[in-house]
Image (spheres, rainbow, N blue to C red):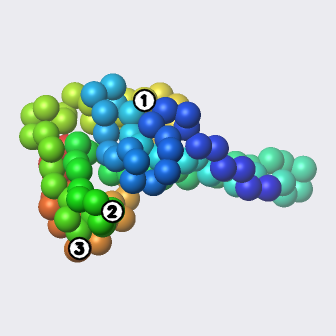
Amino acid sequence: MVISRKKNTRGGTYGSYRGLDDQGEVANFVETEQIIQIDGKVYSYVTFSATPALFYNHGNDNLLQSASITKPQKAAQLPFNKHLQDLLKQYKFVLMINLLSENFKNLSEELSTLA
């Protein structure tokens, strides 16, 4: 069984909300849980995705290639830390993978300074 849950904060269509807010909430957060039963035991595997946990904006073309950072790292650090603490509280263990390609180098570099 596969269940997906979209968080009710900072939702909406992709692109209408972007990145991180001052409360540490990220836009378009979706949790997907896979539940399987083997030999009478139930196992669960959870993954989640969202827009990058940064303060950024991009033009009307909705392409991240034109994305620009809107707040400096110092201003983003506390909300990013809150976001990460909330994830750890909910899931206990978090493995973060940066899926931004080389086309999004400016966002990728900013994200690596916060983590």
Name which of mark 3 and mark 2 comes first in the sequence: 2
Q: Which badge, 1 or 2, is on the more N-terminal residue?
A: 2
Q: Which mark lies nearer to you, 3 or 2?
A: 2
Outermost residue toward the front in this view? 60
Label 2 near label 1: C-beta < 8 Å? no
- For the residue labelled by badge 3, is the local secondary structure a helix, a strand or a loop? helix
Separation of residues labelled 1 and 3 (CA atoms): 29 Å
Please identify, in this view, whether the residue under mark 1 or under mark 2 is nearer the observer.
Answer: 2
Q: Position of residue 40 (x, y in %)?
A: 90, 50
Q: CA distance from mark 1 to mark 2?
A: 28 Å
| Residue ranking furthest to the bottom | 102
* Residue 62 image label: 2
- First in residue order: circle 1 vs circle 3: 1
Q: Measuring 24% from the left and 56% from the top, which residue is drawn there?
A: 58
Q: Residue furthest top?
A: 23
Q: Nearer the viewer, residue 75 or 15?
A: 15
Q: Which corner quadrant holds the N terminus?
A: bottom right
Badge count: 3
Residue at x 16% of width, y 55% of height: 68
Which marked residue is nearer to the observer: mark 1 or mark 3?
Answer: 3
Q: Nearer the viewer, residue 114 or 7?
A: 7
The residue at which mark 1 appears reads as 86
Q: In the rendered image of this protein, does residue 48 appear above or below residue 104? A: above
Element at label 1: helix
Residue 102 percent across, percent down from the top left: 23, 74
- Work out which quarter of the rendered image holds the C terminus and state it: top left
The residue type indicated by label 3 comes to Asn
Q: Residues within 10 Å of mark 2 (few under 14, many from 20)?
A: few
Image point (9%, 40%), residue name: 72
Measure how far apart labels 3 and 2 are at the Cα level.
14 Å
Q: Is residue 102 visible?
A: yes
Which residue is under mark 3?
A: 103
